[in-house]
Amino acid sequence: MFSITLKLMKKSARMLIPAGIAILIGTAFIAATFLFGNAMNDALAAQNTAQLGGANYVISPDSGKDLTDKDQDYIYTRTVNDFQLDRIRATEGVKDARASYAGSVTVTRGNKHASSYVITTAAKRTLLPVTITQGDQPADSNEIALTKSVADQLGVKVGDRVTVNSQAAQYAGKTGDSAGNTGDAGDESAQNADGTSSHDGDSDAASGASVSSDGANTADSGMTVRVVGLTDDPNGAYAYYGGASVLSDNVITAMAGSNDFGNLPVYLVYLDIDDASDTAAASTVKQVSTLLPKHFSVQSRAALVEESVKSMSSGETSITTIFLLSFGILAMLVAALVIANTFQVLVAQRRRTLALLRTIGANKSQLYVSVLFEAGVLGLIASALGVGLGIGLMAALCQSGLMKATGMTMRLVLSGPVFTVPMAFGIIMTVIASLGSARSATAVTPLEALRPIELTDTRRAGVVRAVISVLLIVAGVALCAFSVWQMSENIAGRDSMADKQYPLVLLAAIIGCALIFLGLVLSATFWLPVLMRGVGAMVALAGPSAKVAHANIQKNPRRVAATGAALLIGVTLVSTIATGAASAKQTMNEALTTRYSVDMIAAGTDMTGKQASEAAKVKGVQRGIYAPTRMMTMKDADGKSLSVLVVGVDGVDALRKVVRSDLSGVTIDGDSVLMPKYSAATGKDIPLDKSVTFTAGAAEAQADVANGPSGNDANGSAENGNGQSGGTQTLTLKPRKVDYRRIASNYAAVAFVDASHFTNGGIKADGHIMLMRIDAEGAGVALNDVFTNVQNVFSASAGVTVTGPVAERTQWETMINGMMALLVGLIAVAVLIALVGVANTLSLSVIERTRESATLRAIGMTRGQLRRSLAVEALLLSLVSGVVGVILGTLFGWLGSYMVFSLYGDTVFPFEWATNGVVLGVAALAALLASVAPARRAVKTPPVEALAEA
């Protein structure tokens, strides 16, 4: 029987190809997902262990033990001296040892400056986590091996001299503190997998004296060092920092703000141990272990790699793999509908053959197994090809180097699941999809061998399916209604489940949408053919081709429903995402507009007037004011302290140009201060007395020492305009409250005073702010371009940040657009398979209507008319399903938007004309293309020959 089945498959190969393509696409997606997860795990594991360099063993804190807070404090306060590096290096079998310490420095040559991440050196370059591409690693005092990018930026080469400095060195020099750095901030081992620091990887956060080896203070001028080499970071050990420079011990000590290398905090030491003999290596490890502080042990590189891979398998890459697999499974479910259609027609076409087999002795179980065997063989072949395609696509991605932009070098990593899961899933889904057809095959009787073939499926959909569908839809509608009701109650301020159990309410809405959609897909057999019939009746008025198409599409309602449902799934998901994204952007735009009174602000300690003038000229910036600022504190009427940014402006008329608030009847003079009605931190009313006193005290003056404000005396004036002395500045004014919102969100309030307070010495500015009103639409530019261009103006000043609703809106839209593009791209796989299903349905229709097409040709229908009839049929299938999908997707998107974004403001319910139009246009175009091959087959066969074959 199996040999007969294989022969039948060979004869029907052309019909099986579309179904095979659907399986191939789905399994290729699943295989590529596993390969992507493997490549991510491999790249992240390599990146996590890249800091080891050539080390094969690492001294690290014990893991997996119950450590108290006291133990943790002990571990992270160990210094280089605690590890007895000299004795470790002298141990037999130890080739080299390197204590890991890192931080950030500023490298200067002439008037050029560059920031660089720096690490400790080693006796042998093989132990370094970076590669020395030119010259050598630092060995003596006052030497540095610069990253190639920094060297290029400064225009230096090996042998030149540069100056290095750090905030820790400057601070230590100013305070004269020689206690040394005792924190863990500078340890390079604090980096996470992505290269970011889990503590504070910059040693500039440290405290202590900064004294060079010759005793010179490095606070102001820094240290002059010789460039002895250039480095590269091929393994991405410091990808987040753009690589790392290597410093000699005395230089990195000074940059850490210390005067003794042995006092630097470390908790990782990398070892190069001779492991030619396992026994000798184990003996060396044992000897080294006796020299270590408590709670530290020696671990092999292999063990670290294993731990890294294990952590990745249950971390971000696992989530990524599961996320992508969900779309692969969706693609296979859509493919199952295409497969089911194919096998329905195959069984219908073979009814006479199956009946003859029954006549010569084949029983029902043999016919049943025959259909399932055919499905299994098809699934096996298509899945194998899909796995091969997935491997090829992933190999091309790895070779293309596209992932290098993320700081990771990915390589193709094959594993068992790459082969087993897609193939098993493809075979199982194919067999399951053919079960209904297999049951139909068992219903064939021997007498049917004598009857004419009737391929039209006139069976009615089952009552059980109808009942289940109705129950699912009713339950889904009830859950959605409950969720909306709870959210509306919460928004109105009444008791609601959404107030305390919001995740459950949101989950109820998601489940409700899923149940409605599942119910509609299951009941598509009932409503989709009726809808097609209604639309087709109107289309039939267009002419004979349209009338024939309308008649043909009614002949097999079950297949029409299955094909339409496949396309419905993809279009609904795309429309849902597009609607949700549009609603998110518009809702957040409205929310941001109501929460801010200024479109965009730039603020910082090193902002210049020249930069402000250039920013005001940016296309899309309608107006702008540049003003001095000072961070001060005040107490409200309840005695609560508030951080206030005091801004000096030339009267209220200047504010009206940029602040979107009612400032009528308000004045700002030397005795008054304009205050916001509500706190930006709490949103609550700020109670004020008849006068308020702003203070910039000793704490702010000390902060100025660390931050180094430009052009100001950090310790304050000896005597200010109000007569105060010492390091404290105070200003007492009469408050006038106006409802303006979130000028600068980093402060509880932004207060506006007359600019004369800054010019007469009453307040010493520690920064500047630029308030801007934006009219991108009027200027004919994109909002994102305005934001980017303003950022570029201030890019030379590291201390200036650009914020405000325009900035947040731009960042928000960029994030949403990126997520939307990703999701739509993934769902496009399902849409592609659904369109393959449309082509499959047309091909099967042509095959089973061979006699009918021949008759139409014989009575005068032209080839063009026959082609047009198939094109109309394809358009009816695609567009009707697509329009329903757009409607469903829009409704689901609106519901989701209301459930999520009503928490932030009034939800906007847009209809995404552009995306939905593109989806429908693509579906229509694909449908027309899908009708080409079947139409050629239909018109190619001569009418006489077709009548003879039928």
Image: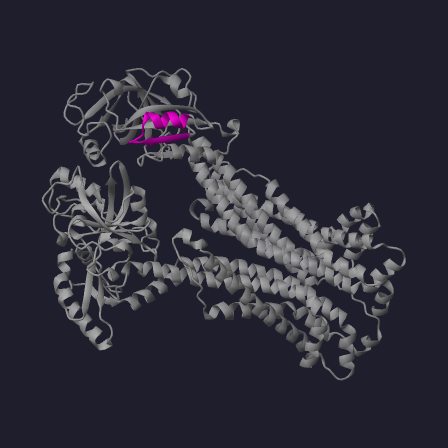
Q: At 18% across and 47% down in the image, what residue appears?
A: 256
Indicate whether residue 862 is drawn in magenta: no
Q: At 21% across and 35% down in the image, what residue appears?
A: 703
Measured as percent of width and height from the top left, residue 637 is found at: 28, 26
Q: Quadrant of residue 282?
A: bottom left
Indicate whether residue 605 is drawn in magenta: yes
Task: Name the residue furthest bottom.
Answer: 361
Q: Quadrant of residue 549?
A: bottom right
Query: Total marks drawn?
Result: 0
User: In the rendered image of this protein, does residue 142 appear above or below residue 739?
Assistant: below
Query: Which region is colored magenta?
Result: 600-616
Measured as percent of width and height from the top left, residue 550 is found at: 79, 53
Would residue 123 appear left or right of 856 to someone viewing this image?
left
Q: At 20% across and 47% down in the image, what residue appears?
A: 226
Q: Quadrant of residue 762?
A: top left
Measured as percent of width and height from the top left, residue 75 is found at: 19, 58
Would residue 539 appear left or right of 494 to someone viewing this image?
right
Toward the viewer: 239 or 726?
A: 239
Q: Is residue 460 visible?
A: no
User: In the rendered image of this protein, does residue 158 appear above or below residue 655?
Assistant: below
